[in-house]
Amino acid sequence: MILAFLLVATVVHADTLAEVKSRGELRWGGDIQGGEPYVYEDPRTPGKLIGFEVEIADGIAGRLGVKAKFVQISWPNLVPGLERGDFDVAMNGLEVTAERRARLRLSRPYFIYSETLAVPRGASLRFLDLPGKRVGTLNQTYAYELLRGLRVEPTLYDGVQEPYLDLAAGRLDAVLLDDIIADRYGCTMAALECLRGEGALGAYVLAMRKGDATLAAAVDSALDDLRRTGELRAILERWHLWNARQEGPAPALAAQALAKRPFDAEQLRLFAQGALVTLWLSVVSFAIAMALGVLLAVARVFGGRVVAGAAAVYVEVFRGTPVLLQLYVLYFALAPVLRLDAFEAAILGLGLNYAAYEAEIYRGALLALPRGQTEAANALGLSRVQTLRHVLLPQALRLALPPMTNDFVALLKDSSVVSVITVVELTKRMTIAGVDLNDWVIPGLACAALYFAMSFPLAQLARMLERRLQRDSHPRPA
């Protein structure tokens, strides 16, 4: 059943326009994470969505005789969600690209933008100098296609502010994004300089499924009326987006569609590389977690009130907050005082997070040891440190081995979250391949197979250790 679900690439509708009118709603997909001025929550009225695209969607829906209904979906899943039938149209800074023209039915443009190159202030870098440089952008964008056309392998982000933060922190050489984004999130930063006119022009459109010809015609008619009556201009002026480009013709594509790539030996090599990154990241992070976890466990069991209390606070804070939030704080929020590259931040973040879980495992193992072990060590004249090192910790770690192995398997899979700070591990490699190949089935199966190949032997090891310890705990009488 799961495989059958994955193989469903599109949803066929006999007449989507008729469905929209029957339903009384035009469902449009977008991602609130895109922020101002696209679609975002009104800071004065939480829960209320505002943005220039919200107003355009309302204008189009009103001309169709229905209401607009926003459907939240992450940006990378915008086009797949449309094809799957999660909503009727996609509109969230969706740019015209050759691949989208072939795959979807695109409306007339409602906004013309210019790509803007942001560089550190005083840098002599220009657009044609980008090959060989570390350049940030968003995935599935026209800027991404332009960079790939220059033979630049860009650093991909999910949010619009993060690449400029990395550029200001010296982790990137440049950022290429639409001027509507650059003006709000990059050009306002004192450390950065925006080079206007360095990139090509592009257009924002609504996207519909290939078979939705009647809906597409109705949407185009609504956009024409928005433009003819001046309502579109009024919306753009209200959001400080109107300029002379909006009265000109739609720009032609400056970059050709990249040739469709098969899932070949090169892709396998990239996936293997991603798997190695995942494995190395997990091993080093878990080593940090084990070392710190032992210290925290000892502090909680044998430390004084202050030391034990501080260790307990650490454990509860790191177990009680999402690892994703911890990575953001470590990588972005602390960048002015703690400048780490993405891989260092990923290792440290996962290590600090899992140390809290390991500490509780080791603490439970220490408390499970018979009190007589400590009394016997004291009788032999061992100090507290010697008792811990030679008597208690070896036995506690032996008891903790099976859950430790299970935790390592969990860390191996949780390492996928580090893609938010631009580490290209196995899951991120799968999403990049899914977009480049326009196919999520084969990359998804390859990703799952590699995770299984790494985690299954560890799971078997955990079960073997559990059986071994059970036998050792209940020896047969001679």
Image: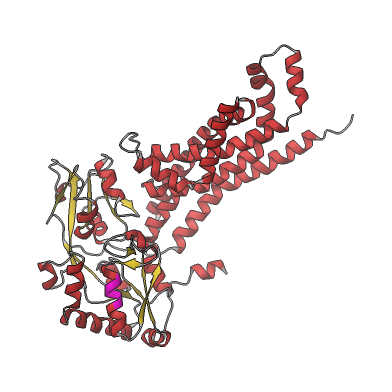
- Image location (x, y in percent) of residue 351: 49, 37
**Residue extending farthest right:** 478
**Residue extending farthest top:** 381
Q: Specify the color scheme.
A: secondary structure
Residue 57 is inside the magenta segment = yes
- Image location (x, y in percent) of residue 312: 57, 35
Question: Residue at left 49%, top 42%?
Answer: 279
Residue 408 is inside the magenta segment = no
Residue 211 is left or right of residue 458, and the answer is left
Asked whether residue 253 is in view, the answer is no
Quadrant (top left, top right, bottom left, bottom right) of the C terminus: top right
Residue 462 is left or right of residue 49, and the answer is right
Which residue is nearer to you in this view: 218 or 267?
218
Q: Is residue 27 above or below residue 152?
A: below
**Is the magenta region chiefly helix, strand or loop?**
helix
Question: Residue at left 72%, top 33%?
Answer: 368
Question: Residue at left 62%, top 45%?
Answer: 459
Which residue is nearer to you in this view: 113 or 334?
334
Q: Quadrant of residue 434?
A: bottom left
Residue 231 is left or right of residue 39, and the answer is left
Q: Quadrant of residue 396?
A: top right
- Image location (x, y in percent) of residue 291: 54, 30
Which residue is nearer to you in this view: 16 or 256?
16
In the image, the segment drawn in magenta is 54-58
Q: Is residue 322 above or below residue 29?
A: above
**Residue extending farthest front:** 44
